[in-house]
Protein backbone atom coordinates (compact mmCIF):
# COMPACT_ATOMS: atom_id res chain seq x y z
CA UNK A 1 0.00 0.00 0.00
CA UNK A 2 1.42 3.39 -0.99
CA UNK A 3 0.37 6.23 1.36
CA UNK A 4 1.28 9.80 2.20
CA UNK A 5 4.00 10.18 4.83
CA UNK A 6 1.62 12.31 6.93
CA UNK A 7 -0.66 9.27 7.38
CA UNK A 8 2.06 7.23 9.11
CA UNK A 9 1.71 7.18 12.91
CA UNK A 10 4.62 7.41 15.34
CA UNK A 11 7.04 4.46 15.40
CA UNK A 12 6.25 3.50 11.81
CA UNK A 13 9.06 2.64 9.45
CA UNK A 14 8.53 3.07 5.73
CA UNK A 15 10.38 3.27 2.42
CA UNK A 16 10.46 6.57 0.56
CA UNK A 17 8.82 6.20 -2.86
CA UNK A 18 8.43 9.71 -4.30
CA UNK A 19 7.78 13.33 -3.44
CA UNK A 20 6.02 16.27 -5.04
CA UNK A 21 7.54 18.89 -2.74
CA UNK A 22 9.03 22.12 -4.18
CA UNK A 23 12.51 21.69 -5.67
CA UNK A 24 14.20 23.97 -3.12
CA UNK A 25 13.10 21.74 -0.21
CA UNK A 26 13.49 18.56 -2.25
CA UNK A 27 17.15 19.36 -2.97
CA UNK A 28 17.85 20.10 0.71
CA UNK A 29 16.20 16.83 1.80
CA UNK A 30 18.06 14.83 -0.83
CA UNK A 31 21.30 16.33 0.47
CA UNK A 32 20.42 14.88 3.88
CA UNK A 33 19.77 11.39 2.48
CA UNK A 34 16.07 11.57 1.58
CA UNK A 35 16.26 9.63 -1.67
CA UNK A 36 13.83 7.05 -3.07
CA UNK A 37 14.40 3.65 -1.48
CA UNK A 38 15.62 5.02 1.87
CA UNK A 39 14.00 3.96 5.13
CA UNK A 40 12.22 6.70 7.07
CA UNK A 41 11.07 6.33 10.67
CA UNK A 42 8.32 8.49 12.13
CA UNK A 43 9.80 9.46 15.49
CA UNK A 44 7.36 11.88 17.10
CA UNK A 45 4.55 14.30 16.35
CA UNK A 46 4.28 17.65 18.11
CA UNK A 47 1.44 17.85 20.66
CA UNK A 48 -0.87 19.56 18.16
CA UNK A 49 0.23 17.17 15.39
CA UNK A 50 2.50 19.54 13.46
CA UNK A 51 5.45 19.38 12.82
CA UNK A 52 6.61 15.75 12.90
CA UNK A 53 10.14 14.46 13.50
CA UNK A 54 11.41 11.93 10.97
CA UNK A 55 14.64 9.94 11.05
CA UNK A 56 16.68 8.92 7.99
CA UNK A 57 19.94 7.16 8.84
CA UNK A 58 21.05 9.24 11.83
CA UNK A 59 19.56 12.55 10.63
CA UNK A 60 16.44 13.93 12.33
CA UNK A 61 14.30 16.18 10.16
CA UNK A 62 11.22 18.19 11.14
CA UNK A 63 8.52 18.49 8.46
CA UNK A 64 5.18 20.25 8.50
CA UNK A 65 2.03 18.36 7.51
CA UNK A 66 1.71 20.35 4.27
CA UNK A 67 5.14 19.01 3.23
CA UNK A 68 4.72 15.43 4.46
CA UNK A 69 1.42 15.05 2.61
CA UNK A 70 3.37 15.47 -0.67
CA UNK A 71 5.74 12.57 0.10
CA UNK A 72 4.64 9.00 -0.72
CA UNK A 73 5.92 5.98 1.19
CA UNK A 74 5.40 2.25 1.53
CA UNK A 75 5.12 0.89 5.10
CA UNK A 76 7.63 -1.69 6.34
CA UNK A 77 6.21 -4.60 8.37
CA UNK A 78 5.46 -4.95 11.17
CA UNK A 79 3.26 -1.92 10.55
CA UNK A 80 0.46 -0.29 12.53
CA UNK A 81 -2.98 -1.74 11.86
CA UNK A 82 -4.18 1.79 11.05
CA UNK A 83 -2.28 1.90 7.71
CA UNK A 84 -2.63 -1.60 6.29
CA UNK A 85 -4.89 -2.51 3.41
CA UNK A 86 -7.58 -5.18 3.21
CA UNK A 87 -6.19 -8.63 3.99
CA UNK A 88 -5.17 -11.16 6.62
CA UNK A 89 -2.64 -10.22 9.31
CA UNK A 90 -1.10 -11.54 12.51
CA UNK A 91 -0.83 -9.24 15.53
CA UNK A 92 2.86 -9.20 16.51
CA UNK A 93 3.13 -6.43 19.13
CA UNK A 94 1.51 -3.53 20.93
CA UNK A 95 3.56 -0.36 20.79
CA UNK A 96 2.92 2.75 22.85
CA UNK A 97 0.00 1.44 24.86
CA UNK A 98 0.12 0.90 28.61
CA UNK A 99 -1.42 -1.88 30.71
CA UNK A 100 -4.96 -0.47 30.30
CA UNK A 101 -4.53 -0.48 26.52
CA UNK A 102 -3.36 -4.11 26.55
CA UNK A 103 -6.27 -5.15 28.77
CA UNK A 104 -8.79 -3.33 26.56
CA UNK A 105 -7.28 -4.94 23.45
CA UNK A 106 -7.49 -8.42 24.98
CA UNK A 107 -11.13 -7.97 26.01
CA UNK A 108 -11.84 -6.99 22.40
CA UNK A 109 -10.19 -10.20 21.22
CA UNK A 110 -7.08 -8.44 19.92
CA UNK A 111 -4.09 -10.29 21.40
CA UNK A 112 -0.54 -10.88 20.25
CA UNK A 113 -0.44 -13.92 17.99
CA UNK A 114 -4.07 -13.59 16.90
CA UNK A 115 -4.98 -13.62 13.21
CA UNK A 116 -7.25 -10.83 12.01
CA UNK A 117 -8.81 -9.92 8.70
CA UNK A 118 -9.02 -6.24 7.72
CA UNK A 119 -12.36 -5.75 5.98
CA UNK A 120 -12.24 -2.00 5.44
CA UNK A 121 -9.62 0.70 6.00
CA UNK A 122 -10.02 4.10 4.39
CA UNK A 123 -7.21 5.75 6.44
CA UNK A 124 -9.72 8.02 8.15
CA UNK A 125 -11.81 7.23 11.21
CA UNK A 126 -12.50 3.68 12.32
CA UNK A 127 -11.51 0.55 10.44
CA UNK A 128 -13.41 -2.72 10.30
CA UNK A 129 -11.73 -6.01 11.19
CA UNK A 130 -12.84 -9.59 11.66
CA UNK A 131 -11.32 -11.63 14.46
CA UNK A 132 -12.46 -15.18 15.12
CA UNK A 133 -16.16 -14.91 14.20
CA UNK A 134 -16.63 -11.31 15.37
CA UNK A 135 -16.59 -8.08 13.37
CA UNK A 136 -15.11 -5.11 15.23
CA UNK A 137 -14.83 -1.38 14.52
CA UNK A 138 -11.45 -0.21 15.77
CA UNK A 139 -10.70 3.47 16.34
CA UNK A 140 -7.79 5.14 14.58
CA UNK A 141 -5.79 5.94 17.74
CA UNK A 142 -6.28 2.42 19.07
CA UNK A 143 -5.24 0.81 15.76
CA UNK A 144 -2.04 2.89 15.61
CA UNK A 145 -0.71 0.96 18.63
CA UNK A 146 -1.38 -2.52 17.18
CA UNK A 147 1.44 -3.70 14.91
CA UNK A 148 0.76 -6.48 12.41
CA UNK A 149 2.45 -8.56 9.73
CA UNK A 150 0.70 -9.92 6.63
CA UNK A 151 -0.16 -13.60 6.37
CA UNK A 152 -0.34 -15.37 3.02
CA UNK A 153 -3.64 -17.21 2.95
Image (cartoon, rainbow, N blue to C red):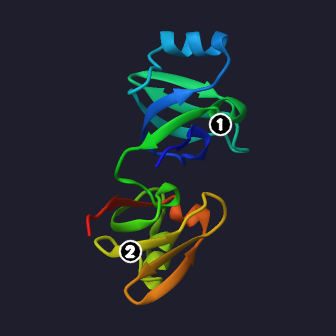
Residue 28 x %, y %: 57, 10
Pointer 1 residue: 69
- In this rendering, position of residue 7 left or right of residue 49: left
Residue 19 x %, y %: 57, 26
Q: Residue at x 47, y 82 (%)?
A: 108
Find the distance from the CA under tag 1 to the CA under tag 2.
29 Å
Q: Residues within 10 Å of mark 1 (few under 14, many from 20)?
A: some
Asked which secondary structure carries label 2, the reply is: strand
Closest to the observer: 118 or 40?
118
Circle number at residue 100: none
Is 41 above or below relative to 59? below
Closest to the observer: 13 or 2?
2
Is 42 above or below relative to 35? below
Earlier sequence position, callout 1 versus callout 2: 1
- In this rendering, position of residue 79 left or right of residue 47: left
Pointer 2 residue: 116
In this rendering, the count of numbered labels is 2
Amino acid sequence: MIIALKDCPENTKCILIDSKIPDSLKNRLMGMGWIPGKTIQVVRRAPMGDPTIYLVDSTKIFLREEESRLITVKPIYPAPLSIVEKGTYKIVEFFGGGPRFVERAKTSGLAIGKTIYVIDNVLRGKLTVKIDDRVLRVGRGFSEKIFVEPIDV
